[in-house]
Amino acid sequence: MKIALIAMSGVRAHNPVLTALGLTLPGFLERGKAIASMPSLSLLTLAALTPERHEVEYHEVADVNEVRAVPECDLAAFSTYTGQVKDAYALADRYAALGVPTVIGGLHVTSLPEEALQHCTAVVVGEGESVWPRVIADMEARRLGAVYQVNGMGFDLSDAPIPRYDLLDAARYNRLTVQTSRGCPWRCEFCASSILLTPRYHQKPVERVMAEIDAIQAIWPEPFIEFADDNTFVNKHYGRELAAAMSGRGIPWFTETDVSVAEDPELLAMLKGAGCRELLIGFESPNRSGLDGLEMKRNWKLGRLDRYRDAVATIQSHGIAVNACFILGLDGQGPEAFDAVERFVEETLPFDVQITFLTPFPGTPLYDRLLAAGRIIDVGGWEKCTLFDVNFIPQQMTPGDLEEWGIGLGMRLYGKEATARRRAGFKAQAAAGPRPTATGAS
Ligand code: B12
């Protein structure tokens, strides 16, 4: 059987002003370039679980309108996030017209399997590893079902296969992803990451992570790695083990974590030598009202607010750049929030800053709440789930205000001078050497 693995790829925003800004502002452009091309880790993982007797081909589709003929195959398997799901459905419809069965998986269809079944033959709900072999076996037996679901506690990352990086032309990418953990112990109302796939936060054994890195180095000897995690350093013991294994490998990497990383001096001291270049941290809001209630288990992020500024300084003093992320349009944010973000950034000088609009992704508590309150503007307008488009009615401003003030803030933050100031700030903080670590963590 020939299986076409099709990734809906590319980064996008529908808002034309923001798109144009992305093309001109240096700070925005740099991160855009770094992430514009990254392969689909889910499909490379499934490829590794496909019996060798089948032929697998990996494809990426950035613009569905440019696909003249869909790749020839006996089964087309799609992976997509919400923003591109309609493009995946359009391709699935083309396969349906040709009589070729299709299967789709990923975060979006995990939340809305019935919608996916209007276009695809089968849908995989949740983590793909445990059910993919069943999908293949059912295809071989000509009895492909409609909905495949993971049972029990989910997939154990100790059994993770090595993704088929060898299917890639390494020259096309500037970063490759490796997953070290899945899930997150926190529950932020807006979060649409792997927490929607797995009931528990767990890590991949470090020796397995290193085997994946070896596999990447077989196709790209000097790679740049992005860990595809929700929150890499929640478990500090694991974090130190990972950092120790990466030490001396000379491989630069980037990951996402929470602000508590600033509370572990031992881990911080290891990160630079381990190759860590940058930590992306969701600060979300610099003001109390914006953060209040955001993390739903124990208001964890609000509890950390007092340490935010210290955390940026501490992390950067270890030579690790911070990419400080803020969400605009949270219920607790009024018009003052835009200046507050700018002030926080100007005062703390993180190397990078990311601002995105609050986005109700299906499957999240935020989506359910806003939908029930009639606050989603275009219900089913999935193409607007880009993080750069506004598709809800904010509590303290109009959608138009949010967009306009967000763009204004973006112009100030991503301009040449502000970007240069942040870069110089980071350099100075790193040159001054390690600061004492914030303590008293709870
Ligand atoms: C790495 C990453 C990227 C990379 C690479 C994306 C890619 N092509 O894979 C880059 C930087 C390019 C990127 C871009 C974007 N991203 Co991104 N990204 C991530 C990140 C950090 C990790 C994703 C990952 O690799 N996970 C590991 C894989 C193994 O998990 P998975 O894809 O969910 O797959 C599992 C299951 O879902 C299932 N599965 C998935 N597909 C299929 C298919 C089949 C057939 C089967 C059987 C099973 C199956 O099995 C897999 C294994 O269990 C997540 C955040 C996070 N921490 O999770 C955000 C995240 C996925 N990104 C997000 C967004 C919004 C985007 C963009 C839309 C932004 C934009 N404005 O364009 C683009 C869209 C990119 C695209 N076209 O795919 C959101 C998606 C939310 C959502 N529900 O849609 C996330 C969750 C972050 C967030 N802010 O919440 N992203």
Image (cartoon, helix red, strand yellow):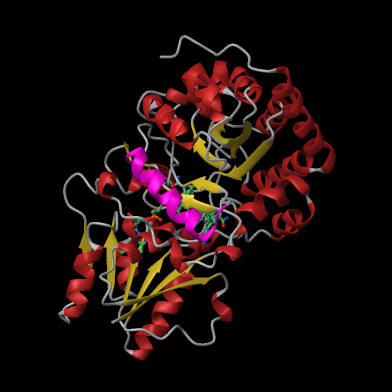
Percent position of residue 308, x then y: 58, 21
Is any atom of residue 146 visible in this view?
no
Residue 124 in view (yes/no) = yes
Q: Is residue 159 left or right of residue 248?
A: left
**173 relative to 70 in the view: left or right:** right
In the image, 177: left or right of 411? left
The residue shown at (57%, 79%) is 65
> For the C terminus, which image quadrant?
top left
Where on the image, by quarter, is ligand 1?
Answer: bottom left
Question: Is 206 in the magenta?
Answer: yes
Q: Residue at x 44, y 45 (%)?
A: 370
- Work out which residue is located at the far top of the displayed protein and give it: 440
Q: Nearer the viewer, residue 276 or 442?
A: 276
Q: Position of residue 406 (x, y in %)?
A: 69, 43
Q: Where is residue 430, by image quadrant? A: top right
- Does the magenta segment cover residue 313? no
In the picture provided, is 254 more to the left or to the right than 32?
left
Instruction: Identify which residue, 347 or 286, lies in the foreground.
Output: 347
Query: Which range is magenta?
Result: 204-221
Pick whichever, 333 or 164, lies toward us: 164
Q: Nearer the viewer, residue 1 or 343?
A: 1
User: Which of the 4 image quadrants contains residue 133?
Assistant: bottom left
Total numbered badges shown on the rendered structure: 0
Q: Position of residue 269 (x, y in %)?
A: 55, 21
